[in-house]
Image (cartoon, rainbow, N blue to C red):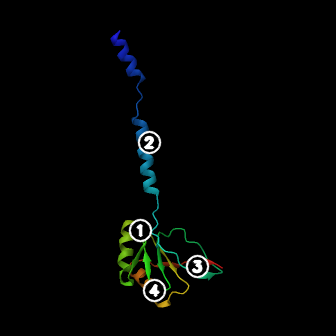
């Protein structure tokens, strides 16, 4: 009688290994396909533009405030450190486009310095964000 009871317990057990394998495979798939966006971290008053196009593959956003502050990855950065910070971000996740979110009252010279730093970091495609006008 004891032997029969042991066999019934063995037959009633469910093997969880295939389900766990599928869950881990799905987890790896979602981690690999997720795109992380490095936002600037602040809101700026963008200039209005009649003709604009959307960039789909941008992962890096740099904000330039009206007082000349530069924000990258939710922290304030000096213009001399922009290239080094972008190179660090590119090492984590490569991209070929950077979007500059410049305030409509930002000084043109600061924006040009940021663009030079971006090109120094090795990115040639730079876009300026604008509001629909």
Q: CA distance from mark 4 to mark 1?
A: 27 Å
Instruction: Give coordinates of residue 79: x percent, y percent.
Output: 39, 84
Task: Classify residue 59 as left or right of residue 78.
Answer: right
Q: Residue at x 44, y 42 (%)?
A: 22
Q: Residue at x 40, y 82 (%)?
A: 117
Instruction: Find numbered disc 3 in the image and state the secondary structure of the residue it sits on.
Output: loop
Identify the mark at residue 94; answer none if there is no mark: 1
Q: Nearer the viewer, mark 1 or mark 3?
A: 3
Are circles 1 and 3 on residues that touch, CB within 8 Å? no
Instruction: Give coordinates of residue 87: x percent, y percent.
Output: 36, 74
Q: Nearer the viewer, mark 2 or mark 4?
A: 4
Q: Residue beneath label 4, please?
A: 68
Q: Residue at x 37, y 12 (%)?
A: 4
Q: Answer with mark 2 or mark 4, whichever residue precedes in sequence.
A: 2
Q: Residue beneath label 2, please?
A: 22
Q: Residue beneath label 3, please?
A: 130
| Outermost residue, left side | 2
Instruction: Find numbered disc 2 in the image and state the secondary structure of the residue it sits on.
Output: helix
**The N terminus lies in quadrant:** top left
Are circles 1 and 2 on residues that touch, CB within 8 Å? no
Neighbourhood count class around disc 4 (C-alpha, 10 Å): few under 14, some 14–19, many 20 upward: some
Q: Nearer the viewer, mark 3 or mark 2?
A: 3
Q: CA distance from mark 3 to mark 2?
A: 44 Å
Q: Residue at x 40, y 31 (%)?
A: 15
Q: CA distance from mark 1 to mark 3?
A: 24 Å
């Amino acid at each position: 009688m004891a032997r029969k009871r042991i066999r019934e317990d063995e037959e009633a057990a469910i093997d969880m290994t295939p389900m766990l394998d599928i869950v881990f495979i799905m987890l790896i798939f979602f981690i690999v396909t997720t795109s992380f966006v490095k936002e600037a971290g602040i809101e700026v008053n963008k200039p209005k533009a009649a003709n604009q196009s959307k960039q789909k593959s941008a992962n890096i956003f740099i904000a330039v405030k009206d007082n000349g502050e530069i924000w990258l990855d939710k922290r304030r950065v000096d213009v001399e450190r922009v290239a080094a910070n972008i190179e660090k971000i590119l090492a984590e996740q490569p991209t070929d486009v950077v979007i500059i979110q410049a305030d409509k009252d930002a000084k043109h010279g600061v924006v040009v310095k940021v663009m030079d730093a971006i090109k120094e970091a090795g990115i040639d495609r730079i876009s300026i964000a604008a509001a629909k006008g």
